[in-house]
Image (spheres, rainbow, N blue to C red):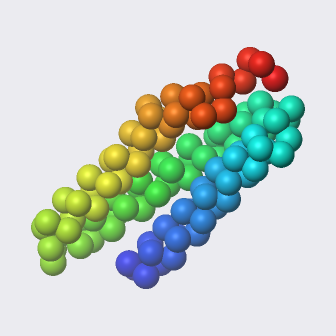
């Protein structure tokens, strides 16, 4: 089961990175379409980040039996990722790309 979780985490992280990279590329190469692309990518990025948090939490519960400290770090990372997705990233995105009103 942990191998499946690891593979799912890798896939989710890759997809999240590609979506974020797409926004950076769009901002640099096709700024006129950035607002549209940000709207299209916003929900998938949040869902991926929440999925990563959920998978890490499950992994933390699984490894708790063999290593409490590792479980605490894993679950803390999961919570941090979810909080960052819901609270920090909207502000960071607005700071990096603007609030979208100019497009």
**Residue 68 locus on image (x, y percent):** 13, 67
Asked if residue 16 lies left or right of residue 58, the reply is: right
**Residue 33 locus on image (x, y percent):** 85, 35
Q: How many marks?
A: 0
**Residue 5 locus on image (x, y percent):** 44, 72
**Residue 90 locus on image (x, y percent):** 54, 31
Asked if residue 28 lies left or right of residue 84, the reply is: right
Q: Is residue 72 above or below residue 67?
A: above
> Which of the pair 14/2 is nearer the observer?
14
In terms of image quadrants, where is residue 6? bottom left
Whether residue 65 is visible to the viewer of this picture, yes or no, is yes
> Which of the pair 19/26 is nearer the observer?
26
Residue occupying the far top of the picture:
101
Asked if residue 44 lies left or right of residue 4, the reply is: right
Instruction: Determine the residue positioned at 15% across, 73% down.
Output: 67
Whether residue 40 is visible to the viewer of this picture, yes or no, is no
Instruction: Determine the residue positioned at 86% across, 32% down.
Output: 32
Instruction: Determine the residue positioned at 48% across, 48% down.
Output: 50
Q: Is residue 5 above or below residue 81?
A: below
Instruction: Determine the residue positioned at 58% across, 69% down.
Output: 11
């Amino acid at each position: 089961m942990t191998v499946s979780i690891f593979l799912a985490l890798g896939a989710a992280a890759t997809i999240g990175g590609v979506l974020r990279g797409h926004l950076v590329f769009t901002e640099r190469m096709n700024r006129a379409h950035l607002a549209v692309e940000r709207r299209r990518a916003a929900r998938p990025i949040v869902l991926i980040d929440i999925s990563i948090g959920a998978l890490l939490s499950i992994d933390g519960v699984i490894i708790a039996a063999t290593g409490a400290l590792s479980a605490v770090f894993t679950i803390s990372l999961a919570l941090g990722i979810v909080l960052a997705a819901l609270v920090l990233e909207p502000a960071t995105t607005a700071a990096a790309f603007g609030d979208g009103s100019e497009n």
